[in-house]
Image: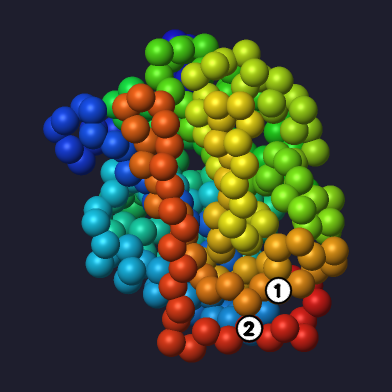
Amino acid sequence: MNLNLQNATYQLTPATANNVSPVTIIQLTDTHLFKEKSGKLLGLNTHKSFQAILEHIAGSAPADLILATGDLAQDGSSDAYRRLSSALSSLNMPSFWLPGNHDDPDVMAQSMINKFVFSQKRILIQNWQIILLDSKVDNKVHGQLSSEQLDFLHACLSDKPEHYALVALHHQPMNVGSKWLDGIGLKNSAEFFAVMARHSQVKGVMWGHVHQEFEKNMGQVKLFSTPSTCVQFQPGSEDFEAGMQDPGYRRLQLLSDGSIESEVIHIRPLDFKVDYSIRGY
């Protein structure tokens, strides 16, 4: 293992001592927090909806780790990231993050520091590795994986061929059936899938960005997106359209045989309100 790969890796001890128990993950995505707690996205207070999600997680069975998959701040502010980091730490579960198109990775790296929040982009736990990729393109809404990110993916998979792999990124690597969203996904998805095709241990790919639930199988690989913790986008829409679905998150179980089970959980905050007259974000 080279030094860069070693520095990027976090060895995580599972919550259970039994190494055949499922690895449980919570995916939170597209929180779109603002510098001020009063900040709203399409009329919805993103801080309050995020707090409702956290309260539900806190009252549920514990997980081994949390993955926050981008667009964590709408305005890229350090205040938003620090508040997010503190909130994640309150769950007493290790959390890992990757940037989305609205995020500022440099500010994230400086602000997302807390007892339970880590910046490593590869997690080893039981017989799984989880790889977090950066698909952000500066000043663009669409995504692209740099050659360095593709090399990192290949290096991780080559280094641990005996580990099953789950790959996470922000931008969708395939069309989800909404014309406007399909135009702002991952631009070099063919290169991404070409790397994965060289490694049969990849069992799942997860992303955010599209603010909706999506699932598809590609051979033995499960591909899925997860709803935002705030406003959703209407599935199947030609142009921008906010959806009526409630804020949500995904809970996954990585099984020792390489299979993945998951469910999407929706939460209705007490003051859930979206302004459907707004035609963009």
Crowdedness of circle 2 by 10 Å Cα count: few (<14), some, many (20+)? some
> Quick check: 40 above or below 81?
below
Where residue 195 sits, quadrant-wise, is top right
Task: Please tell me which residue is depicted at 75% across the width and 33% down the height of the picture.
Answer: 189
Q: Position of residue 91 (x, y in %)?
A: 28, 59
- For marks 1 and 2, the one nearer the N-term is 1
> Quick check: 131 above or below 86?
above
Number of numbered callouts drawn: 2
Q: Which label is found at residue 274? A: 2
Q: Position of residue 72 (x, y in %)?
A: 55, 59
> Quick check: 105 above or below 18?
below
Task: Please tell me which residue is depicted at 52% across the width and 12% down the height of the picture.
Answer: 158
Q: Position of residue 153 (x, y in %)?
A: 58, 23
Q: Are marks 1 and 2 in contact (CB under 8 Å)?
A: yes
Where residue 200 sits, quadrant-wise, is top right
Q: Using the rendered image of the protein, determine whether residue 148 is visible from the camera's viewpoint.
A: no
Tell me which amino acid carries mark 1. Ala
Tell me which amino acid carries mark 2. Val
Where residue 54 sits, quadrant-wise, is bottom left
Near-viewer residue (36 or 176): 176
Q: Position of residue 198 (x, y in %)?
A: 62, 13
> Quick check: 247 above or below 195?
below
Task: Please tell me which residue is depicted at 76% across the width and 61% down the height of the picture.
Answer: 236
Name the residue beneath numbered marker 1.
242
Per the model, the C-alpha gap separating discs 1 and 2 is 8 Å
Is 174 placed left or right of 31 in the picture? right
Q: Which label is found at residue 10? A: none
Q: Using the rendered image of the protein, determine whether residue 142 is visible from the camera's viewpoint.
A: yes
